[in-house]
Image (tube, rainbow, N blue to C red):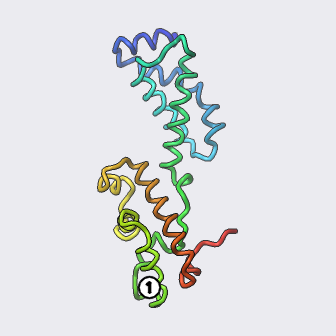
């Protein structure tokens, strides 16, 4: 089927043209996504392509043939979808910078000395209440990013980003405490 016909059908509101467009245009982006996102697992790359084309279909009224081809126009959606997948992907998620932070035991007084607990408390007190809440939801209550997003009223991607920033700020605060040096990750 001709790409221009599919685009015309989409603009006329024919819902069946969307899935056909995904199957026609999707393979065009496989090499591009492999080049820019080789760090992502194949299912994530495929989902990025599908998501990008779906977004392009949703915004088909904004596409102007006079400014470029449909694949060229859609490439921007692909880049953004890859970035979204990277944020969602475990491989693309920021490393936890305190070795024990994901485990609630870091807050367990029975496994920490008084000096360590005091230093940890001071480091936590030095970050914002919002960061403290995010860390508590993620690592003490062990909520998923989707659940945290619901609590905070933000997207899941924003939840991941806020968690990463809170961890980074906690790390900066913890680096100043010699009592927590054993928990800091060593650079290899």
- Quarter of the image where one finds residue 147: bottom left
Give the residue pinned by disc 1.
Answer: 118
> Crowdedness of circle 1 by 10 Å Cα count: few (<14), some, many (20+)?
some
Which residue is found at the position 53% from the left and 69% from the top?
171
Query: In the picture provided, is 82 more to the left or to the right than 57?
Result: right
Residue sitting farthest toward the right: 188
Q: How many marks?
A: 1
- Quarter of the image where one finds residue 121: bottom left
Up-down relation of residue 67 to residue 101 (above or below): above
Q: From the top left corner, tell me how far across and down residue 124 is, in percent.
A: 43, 74
Query: In the picture provided, is 20 more to the left or to the right than 25?
Result: left
Question: Can residue 1 be seen from the camera position used here?
Answer: no
- Quarter of the image where one finds residue 60: top left
Q: From the top left corner, tell me how far across and down residue 84 is, in percent.
A: 49, 43
Question: Can residue 20 be seen from the camera position used here?
Answer: yes
Q: From the top left corner, tell me how far across and down residue 52 is, in percent.
A: 48, 31
Up-down relation of residue 107 to residue 22 (above or below): below
Which residue is found at the position 48% from the left and 59% from the top?
165
């Amino acid at each position: 089927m001709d790409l221009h016909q599919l685009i015309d059908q989409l603009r006329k509101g024919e819902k069946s043209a969307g899935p056909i467009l995904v199957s026609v245009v999707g393979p065009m982006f496989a090499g591009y996504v492999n080049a820019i996102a080789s760090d992502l697992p194949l299912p994530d790359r495929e989902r990025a392509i599908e998501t990008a084309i779906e977004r392009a279909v949703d915004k088909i009224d904004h596409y102007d043939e006079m400014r470029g081809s449909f694949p060229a126009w859609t490439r921007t959606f692909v880049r953004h979808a890859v970035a979204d997948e990277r944020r969602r992907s475990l491989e693309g998620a920021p490393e936890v910078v305190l070795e024990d932070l994901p485990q609630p035991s870091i807050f367990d007084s029975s496994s920490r000395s008084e000096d360590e607990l005091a230093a940890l408390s001071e480091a936590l007190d030095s970050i914002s209440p919002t960061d403290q809440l995010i860390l508590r939801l993620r690592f003490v209550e062990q909520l998923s990013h989707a659940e945290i997003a619901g609590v905070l009223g933000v997207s899941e991607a924003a939840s991941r980003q806020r968690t990463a920033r809170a961890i980074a700020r906690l790390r900066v605060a913890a680096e100043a405490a010699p009592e927590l040096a054993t928990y800091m990750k060593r650079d290899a």
